[in-house]
Image (cartoon, rainbow, N blue to C red):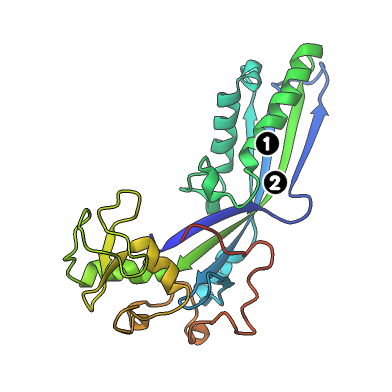
Amino acid sequence: MAVETWIRTAPGTAIRFNVLALGEERAGLSSVHLRCTVTLEHATRRLRGSGLVLPDRVRPEFLLQQQPSTSDEVRDLRDPSVLLRPDDVLRAVLDMLASAPVLRGLDLSDESAWDGEHAPRRVAAWLREQGSRWLASCPERRCRFEVDARLRVTRVFSEPRAVLRRCVEVAMQTVEPGSEEECRICLDEFRDGGKSGPVNLPCSHAYHAHCMLTWLDRGAICPTCRHDLAGMVAPAPWVAPTAWAAPTTASSSTATARRPGLRARGRR
């Protein structure tokens, strides 16, 4: 897909923990209370952008989405021993986090989607540790395990990947995987099973898909005939029309996205 999602903990004290002893006299069950505040950001990896990811100026209808949203989930511990089972407690944490509107539908268990610390595993580890202490000392005392998490979600539109998807749609794919022809970037044959499959450009020249992704970080033309590919990509659906300009180059003074949180990543 041309859009990928990065999830990360917000700067500062992104996850706070607390155990509140309710006492034996309090009615009810012990519980886990997870409060999650999520901020959504939009960014683009531009053609000729040297892999930099730059924040976008979004359309008015997307501004509301960028306001921090908070969800509160409370789960009663009808079976306190669940805190001792690693898989079960992680599954419960993932389910509670998924209740946040911005996180709904995302695969939060996919650690490759997390930019840095995998927050669900950290929360699950803390719950197991505190749950073990509680059950070993005074399980009859009711407790509330409180977690306050702040996360940032960045939706990144990859122009290089969008160009390749468009090539597959509009150009006749004449080179098949396993062909003895060579990629004109890396000079390896397409039959090399360790490489990505070939993709034909509108000019009929073929390259490994991953080779072209790297190439499009530096230029927007066919490496062989200089056929212009820039016109094959439209801006991300959230980009404000007035914000759409010529692709940023590596030497541009605005290419500052290597600050923490919007650094380039290996996946494209």
Residue 182 spot, x, y in % from top left: 26, 64
Residue 217 spot, x, y in % from top left: 47, 73
According to the image, label 2 marks what residue? Answer: 149
In the image, residue 157 sits, relative to residue 38, either above or below, namely: below
On screen, residue 210 versus residue 29, left or right, reads left
Asked if residue 161 shows in the view, the reply is no
**Image quarter of the N terminus:** bottom left
Quadrant of the rendered structure where residue 132 is? Answer: top right
Residue at 33% x, 65% y is 187
Asked if labels 2 and 1 touch by Cβ distance under 8 angstroms, the answer is: yes
Q: Nearer the viewer, residue 121 or 174?
A: 174
Residue 183 spot, x, y in % from top left: 30, 65
Quote the CA–CA distance across marks 1 and 2.
9 Å
According to the image, label 1 marks what residue? Answer: 123
Q: Nearer the viewer, residue 114 or 108?
A: 114
Residue at 77% x, 12% y is 136
Query: Label 2: how many residues lie within 10 Å, few (<14), some (14-19) or many (20+)?
Result: many
Q: What element carries label 1?
A: helix
On screen, residue 26 versus residue 192, left or right, reads right
Quadrant of the rendered structure where residue 111 is? Answer: top right
For badge 1, the amino acid type reads Val
Asked if residue 28 shows in the view, the reply is yes
For badge 2, the amino acid type reads Ala
In the image, residue 149 sits, relative to residue 212, either above or below, namely: above
Q: Nearer the viewer, residue 110 or 106?
A: 110
Labels 1 and 2: the sequence-earlier one: 1
Residue at 22% x, 55% y is 177
Query: Label 1: how many residues lie within 10 Å, few (<14), some (14-19) or many (20+)?
Result: many
